[in-house]
Image: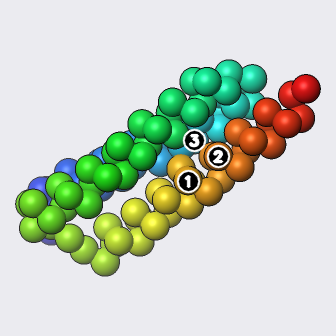
């Protein structure tokens, strides 16, 4: 396995990290920061696929890892932000 395969996966892992940080900030009532972290995750999610195609390092693992990132950053994180926001009042 070439080390170049790690580069797009680094963007995917960063997207997951921002999604988890968004959940953490939402649990502390910092909803604006949490929403911006989800937006940052959106940017990283768009970049990881492009980088993988540009460097010709697409893989089955990368596809599944990106799907996991999508669930965390665009499924769980926004749901928890909404949950904590509604429950905060």
**Residue 25 x, y percent position in the rendering:** 65, 27
Number of marks drawn: 3
Residue 8 higher or lower than 28, as above or below = below
The foreground one among 45 and 57 is: 45
Q: Is residue 2 visible?
A: no
The residue at 42%/36% (across/down) is: 40
The residue at 85%/36% (across/down) is: 86
Residue at numbered disc 3: 20
The foreground one among 60 and 75 is: 75
The foreground one among 49 and 5 is: 49
Q: In whole angstroms, how far apart are the C-alphas of marks 3 and 1?
A: 11 Å
Residue at numbered disc 1: 74
Q: In whole angstroms, how far apart are the C-alphas of marks 3 and 2?
A: 11 Å
Q: Which quadrant: the C terminus?
A: top right
Q: Nearer the viewer, mark 3 or mark 2?
A: 2
Q: Do the numbered discs 3 and 2 sit on residues whose CB atoms are within 8 Å?
A: no
**Label 3 crowd bin: few (<14), some (14–19), many (20+), radius 10 Å:** many
Residue 78 disc label: 2
Whichever of callouts 3 and 2 sits on the residue coming sooner in the sequence is 3
Indicate the quadrant where residue 9 lies.
bottom left
């Amino acid at each position: 396995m070439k080390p170049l395969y790690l580069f797009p996966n680094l963007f995917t892992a960063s997207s997951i990290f921002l999604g988890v940080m968004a959940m953490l900030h939402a649990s502390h009532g910092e909803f604006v920061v949490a929403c911006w972290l989800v937006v940052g995750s959106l940017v990283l999610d768009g970049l990881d696929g492009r980088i993988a195609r540009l460097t010709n390092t697409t893989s089955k693992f990368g596809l599944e890892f990106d799907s996991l990132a999508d669930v965390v950053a665009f499924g769980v994180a926004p749901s928890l932000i909404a949950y904590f926001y509604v429950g905060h009042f």
